[in-house]
Image (cartoon, rainbow, N blue to C red):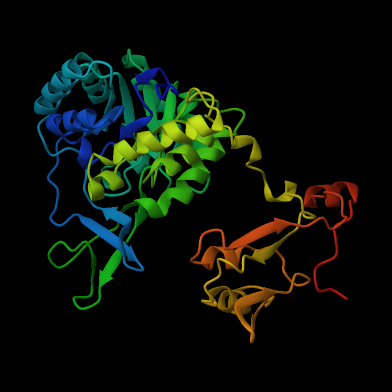
Amino acid sequence: MPDLSVNCAGIRAPNPFWLASAPPANSGLQVQRAFDAGWGGAVWKTLGTPIQNVSGRFGGHTVRGVQGAGFNNIELITDRPIDVNLREIAETKRLFPKHALVVSLMVETREEWRDIIKRSIDAGADGLELNFGCPHGMCERGMGSAVGQEPRINQEITSWAVEYSTVPVLVKLTPNVSDIVPHGLAAKRGGAHGVSLINTIKSIIAVDIDRFVPEPRVGHASTNGGYCGAAVKPIALHMVAALAREKQFGLPISGIGGVSNWRDAVEFILLGSSSVQVCTEVMLRGYRVVEDMIDGLEEYMRTHGFDSIDRMVGKAVPAFSEWGDLDLNYETVAKIDADKCIGCQLCVAACHDGAHQCIHPTAASRVPTVDESECVGCNLCQIVCPVPECISMVEVNNGHAPATWNEHVTQGKTLRPKKGAH
């Protein structure tokens, strides 16, 4: 049986699946129900000076009938008294001593940080997460992403937290920057034990085209909010991997952003995450989604020979390369399995209108043909095909030695001629 237990920056948990700091981790009863369902940890909804939220506060992005493919919120930190939160944290930790209980924090002054850190640790927090990522409401008050976008301030406040804390400190980074690496390095200089990322992306989810008001509507107006959910996973994976491969960084990572199933979690772990945090999928489907996540992860580990999460962490990072180091002489072509093809012709339309005009309909068969001399292996046909494994991208031995653009520039290595050239 694979060992799913994790140690993320000194915070131990029975499995890598944690609730992110958000509505599903808003109260003791919620977190306790989540732990009963199988979650290995939870990051408590951010504590600070309680605020008053607006109504409404959530918005969803529907893609071809899939509701909640992207999600947006304009909710802020806890709206419940600090004393109530701390009492529930203590009770939850008493009931679930082996689960990871991390407390998210966001305050302003050094004195406030010292006070809230001490009270959180006294309540039983296994770790702290500094919320430097919220892109709305709190940043206008000089907190959230206003801190996360300024490496100097990030470093300074992190150093305060590390000075006052006796438990590990994670810094939650904002994705609303051009390059995540300087911000991760700032957290490291401040003494952070690890980072978590990504927080939500500044966005407008939709517009009510009858009322002429952005969504989610609050009376007669709205504002930008934080974008999350399945649609942000590619952005989150890139930022996690960018830090994981940075040689000067070297801190543990708790990955966040669009984790909807066990496959997503595996991808985050292979790109450097020691734990994964989930919010939107729980909001849409409930706590029990973790059951399939655990089962799927265990089966993946068994079939791929991993006996622990540690052996998986970062396994794909060495293959994350710069474009200039890719082999430009590597070649694939599309192959269509005639037995599986249903004759929908989607690959024909996609190839003719969006790619290289190498897939053609045939009069005598429902199965299109591929002109391999023109196929550049772009993958578009495979992406649009509705039948799993009907179209494969097959490697071609074209007789050219591997060569990258960087080698071409520095060493004069020859690149193969462009297809179709005469």
- The reply, left or right, for residue 244 in relation to residue 153 is right
- The reply, left or right, for residue 361 in relation to residue 55 is right
Q: Quadrant of residue 32?
A: top left
- The reply, left or right, for residue 116 in relation to residue 394 is left
From where the camera sits, is residue 94 visible? yes
**The C terminus sits in image quarter:** bottom right
- The reply, left or right, for residue 267 in relation to residue 62 is right
From where the camera sits, is residue 107 visible? no
Judge whether 269 appears above or below 122 on screen: below
Indicate the position of residue 67 as horizontal and vertical percent values.
Answer: 29, 61
Q: Who is closer to the viewer here, 213 or 296?
A: 296
Indicate the position of residue 196 as horizontal and vertical percent values.
Answer: 40, 33
Indicate the position of residue 66 as horizontal and vertical percent values.
Answer: 32, 62
Q: Who is closer to the viewer here, 271 or 14?
A: 14
Indicate the position of residue 274 as horizontal and vertical percent values.
Answer: 45, 28
Judge whether 172 appears above or below 202 on screen: above
Q: Who is closer to the viewer here, 362 or 245?
A: 362
View extreme (front): residue: 339
Q: Quadrant of residue 31?
A: top left
**The N terminus sits in image quarter:** top left
Taking the spot 38% from the left edge, 27% from the top edge, the residue there is 170
Taking the spot 33% from the left edge, 30% from the top edge, the residue there is 130
